[in-house]
Image (cartoon, helix red, strand yellow):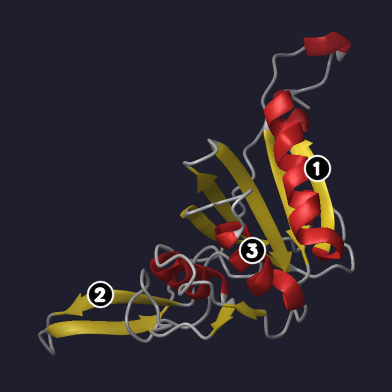
Amino acid sequence: MTSKLEQLDTALRAALGERIVALQASVGELTLDVAPAHYRDVCLALRDDAELHFEQLIDLCGVDYAQYGNAVRDEAGRFMVVVHLLSLKHNWRLRVRVRCADDDLPLVASINDIWNSANWFEREAFDLYGIIFEGHPDLRRILTDYGFIGHPFRKDFPLSGTVEMRYDPDSKRVIYQPVTIEPREITPRVIRETGYGGLGGVSRAGLGR
C-alpha cells in the first residue's frame, strides 16, 4: 500500500476496531466490509471522526451476487450495498460494503440522514434490486414506471420483462399487456475461420455454439 492508504488503514482500524469485517486495498483504494448490524454506526464514525472525516457520499449502489462468476454464490448473502465516500479534508476515498443478511427480504439501515446525497441512490437500489433501506423517509420507485412489478437488475429478472406497453387505437389510450416477444438467448456466437488455432477441418457451424 502507498503511504496515504497506510495512513487511512491505520485510522480506520483505530476508529472502528472490531466492527471491521474485512479491510483490503484494491486498485489504489481501500475497501471496508462491515456487518449489517454495524453499518449505520460505522457510517456515523466515518463522517464524524476527526481522523477520518468522510463528509461526502459520492455513490451508493446495489449488487446481486446470484450465480456470481458462473458459480454458486457463497453463503454470505446474495445482495450487497456498496458506498463510495470522499474526504475532502484528508483527500481520501473509501469503498464501504455491507451484505444484506436476508435474501428474501434484503434490508439495511438508511444512511440518508448521515449523507443526504444517499436519498435518490437508495431509492434507485430499492427500485432496481428490491433492497429495503430501513428509515428512509420516502422509499419509492424512481426509475421504473408506475405499477412496475419486480426489480429489473436482479439476476433472475427476465431479460424481456414481464409486461409491455403500447398505444391501443381502439380504446385511444396506452395499455399494458403480457410480453409478446419470445425469450431469446443473447450469448454471442463465436465464429472462427476454418483451421484457426490448429482446429483444421472444423466448420464454422461447429464452432458457433
Q: Considering only order in the chain, which callout, 1 or 3, is on the residue closer to the N terminus?
A: 1
Residue that mark 3 sits on: 45
Tag 2 and tag 1, C-beta contact below 8 Å: no
The quarter of the image holding the C terminus is top right
Within the image, what quadrant is residue 178 found in?
bottom left
- In the rendered structure, the answer to whether residue 82 lies left or right of residue 160 reads right
Mark linked to residue 24: 1
| Residues at marks 3 and 1, CA–CA distance in whole angstroms | 19 Å
User: Counting other residues with Cα less than 10 Å from the Cα at mark 3, is it few (<14), some (14-19), or many (20 or more)?
Assistant: some
Q: In terms of secondary structure, where does tag 1 sit? A: strand
Observer able to see residue 133: yes
Neighbor class of circle 1 (other Cα within 10 Å; few <14, some 14-19, many 20+) is: few
Position of 49 relative to 190 (above/below): below
Three-letter amino acid code at the position of disc 2: Arg
Residue name at image x 87 percent, y 9 percent: 198
Q: Name the residue under label 2.
A: 166
Q: Position of residue 117 (x, y in %)?
A: 40, 62
| 136 or 8: nearer the viewer | 8
Give the quadrant of residue 21: bottom right
The residue closer to the viewer here, 194 or 79, is: 79
Q: Earlier in the sequence, mark 2 or mark 1?
A: 1
Lower position in the chain sequence, tag 2 or tag 3: 3
Question: At label 1, which amino acid type do we have?
Answer: Gln
At x 12% / y 80%, what residue is drawn? 169
Query: Looking at the image, which residue is at 79% across and 52% down?
Result: 14
